[in-house]
Image (cartoon, rainbow, N blue to C red):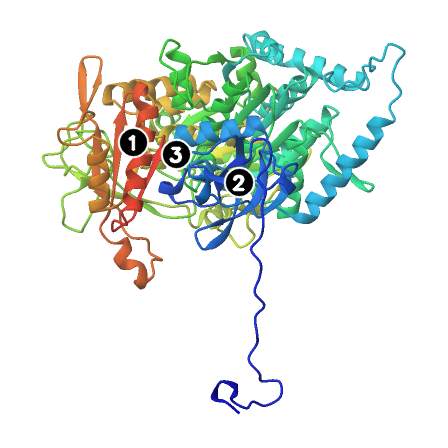
Amino acid sequence: MSMSEAMQPTFDGMQPRTRRTRGKATHTPAAQLPVARVVLDIQATHLGRCFDYLIDERLDDAARPGCLVRVRFGGQRVSGIIWERVEHSDTDASALRYIERVLSGVVMGDEMRRDVAAIADAYGGTCANIVRVALPQRIAAVDKEMAQFAAAQFAAAQDVVMQPDDTPTDATRSDVPSIDNARAAAVVAMRGDFARRYEQAHVLADALGAGRFQSFVVDAVAGLAIDDLAWMAASALAHGTSAVLVMPSMREVWELMRALEGTGLSAFAPDGDTWAGDVAVLSGSLGPAERYRSYLAVSSGRVRCVVGTRAAMYAPVSGPVLFAVLDDGAYQYADGLMPYANARGVCRLRARLHDGVFVAMAYARSVLSQWECEDTTAMPVAVSGPSTAIVPYRDVARATAPPVRWLNRDELARLADPSIGARVPHTAVRVLSGALEHGPVLFSIPSDGISESLVCARCLRQARCLRCTGPLERVGANATPRCRWCGAPAVDWHCPHCGGDRMRVVRVGAAGTAQELQGLFRGVPMILSSPHQPQGVIEQVADAPAIVIATPGAEPRVRAGAYRAVAILDAWTSLYRQNIDAYIDVLRDWMRAMALCAPRADGGAGLLIGETDPVIAQSLMMWDSRMLAAAELAQRREAGLPPVVSAACVWGQRNAVAEALRRIGVVGDGDWARLRLGDDEFPAVLGPVPIPPERTVDSRELEQMRDRVRAVVLVAHARRAELAARLRTAVATHVAAREFGELRFRVDPKDLL
């Protein structure tokens, strides 16, 4: 035996495996448009572009724009979506790979892909960033189910009997909206009710079927916001227009669904062996299969009305669309993933792209809505611009809301109330005891937690920065207070209202409210509704005598009735909130609570207990939020703050933020270092200010999280689009160069803190 024939002996079953050599796969490019431009599921900003792949002829029919595919990128397989097909690629053909597999049919049509690109540009993100949050997780079983339904529909269409002139009847034409007589009558009746409540109601009603872009700001009538939105959706559907209604939480979603059912519309739900309905719900709280099924139903055109939370802003609708947002200034509308798009801006942008109608409806008008209504000649940007105000008639607004009394020190002194300074004075106890004889009473408390603010020791107004009007905060026991916006120390500080030069710390909280009220209202059942309480948020209460204590947003509805009285406790805490929209947010919470009370004609009563800014109190008592919104906008103009200008927050590691600010040209000798508004000039950057580490930060993450700062960049509206592009480029450069530290940004932030 030769040495070459010698082998190491092995036990049975332990021989080394022999691999068969695979022949190289042969591919033939598609005859027409063989190159697919694919958006990959890769979130890195510097890779936020389309990548070119070849399409094999066997996948030519399946690989359509908008389909999900599987491709090779680097050394791994990743998912992507075909954005478009082209004839040639700028990349050399020898370097192009082939698409390995087509995962689904078209899940993102032409108009939706256009919208995604526009949203990405408006907020400084990439198409992959938007696709990640807009497209639900794919469920293969749902894809198969929808394919079977489409096949059944196609087969049924082949059996349609044509008229002698080969023209389909109105019942078979897809371009004619189908609406039965009962639904049409309901829509007409609701339009009449809407017209009796609002000035210029006909302008909005006519716009729903005009087929061109129009924007509206609607100040809601107490207790009727949901009903008015239901009429708008039903009217849009009657005109052949799709409707997307975005709500701040699922509580409002289910209330709106019940109102839509009252107009004759049905929910998209199982119907025998298939699914059918007029209204689909899109929300991140739904199960993966349910959300994906609803998404495909809207994308295919089976459903033309969408109701949901923030996720509904990405509904894959086509053609003219009504986009409506309730409480457009709510915190829930800010996306938590890059590029941190806001639902209000996204819906307005998409309404313009679809030649549709945008409606921002709220009890308390946001400052942005006020700016859109006042500055009708201002330059529109991608996500905002001039709007038409729709306001209720004054007598209707006052009749549908309860009469509100402001029990501050001056009013209690006028009434000779001996309990001035008490949390619930005797006058309030007397009014609420009378209301409890007829039904439930709601106490709205500010929060369950405890916060800290600096106030003037003389007049108790919140201490604010003399440079930028930002709130001051303590950074140490004996350290000089600093501004939370621009970081400037409060040296030689004085109160602009009373001239006082001393500050004091105020801690606010609502613990023990139930125990306190039990001593005032003996024997009355107590119900506490709050996400921080063991029983959580209570959805409904009986229309019977009881005291309900709830935090904002957690107020239970009265089953088949309304509260006999609503009391706002601790109104003085409104003076010490830190965010820039603090007063507007406070008024929104109070008006939403008061909207649950019985109207004036039915004996309802509202109480505002404690000191607060007179403009907030007057806006609540008159049920006219324009007073506060106009005052806030005037102050923003003086200080050069949004929405008079466009803004972006940049945060991360100190050196990374400093370098990003230099790259976009807003510091030093940069071309955007100064912001000019009329005859006034302001610095383009507020800050940077330190960001304290989270209490839950792990010790292993502390090194990455330390020395983090935040800065606010201000530019004129004409430069907003370029600001978003510059920030995206700065972050892409930072990531591609593997520079140390975190770096993020948000365009149009809700808060500047």
Q: Which amino acid, by three-letter code, is at mark 2?
A: Leu
Foreground residue among 590 and 267: 267
Q: Which amino acid, by three-letter code, is at mark 3?
A: Ala
Say which residue appears at 24% left-offset and 36% top-offset: 485
Give the CA separation, mark 3 to mark 1. Answer: 43 Å
Foreground residue among 474 and 550: 474
Q: Which amino acid, by three-letter code, is at mark 1?
A: Arg
Could you tell me if the residues under marks 3 and 1 are in contact, i.e. CB atoms within 8 Å? Answer: no
Tell me if I can see residue 7 in this picture: no
* SS label for mark 1: helix
Q: Which mark is first along the chain, 2 or 3?
A: 2
* SS label for mark 2: strand
Residue 165 is left or right of residue 238, and the answer is right
Residue carrying label 3: 571
Give the CA separation, mark 3 to mark 2. Answer: 65 Å
Frontmost of labels 3 and 2 is 2
Answer few, some or many: residues within 10 Å of disc 2's Cα (few below 14, many 20 plus, some between 14 and 19). Answer: many
Q: Is residue 98 above or below residue 7?
A: above
Residue carrying label 2: 54
* SS label for mark 3: helix
Q: Is residue 538 above or below residue 159?
A: below
Q: Residue 556 occupies which quadrant of the picture?
A: top right
Tell me if I can see residue 514 in this picture: yes
Q: Which mark is first along the chain, 1 or 2?
A: 2
Residue carrying label 1: 726
Say which residue appears at 57% left-offset and 27% top-offset: 110
Residue that protrudes farthest toward the front in the picture = 2
Q: Is residue 254 above or below residue 353?
A: below
Residue 20 is left or right of residue 215, and the answer is right
Residue that protrudes farthest toward the left in the picture = 492
Residue 258, position as x, y percentages in the image = 69, 32
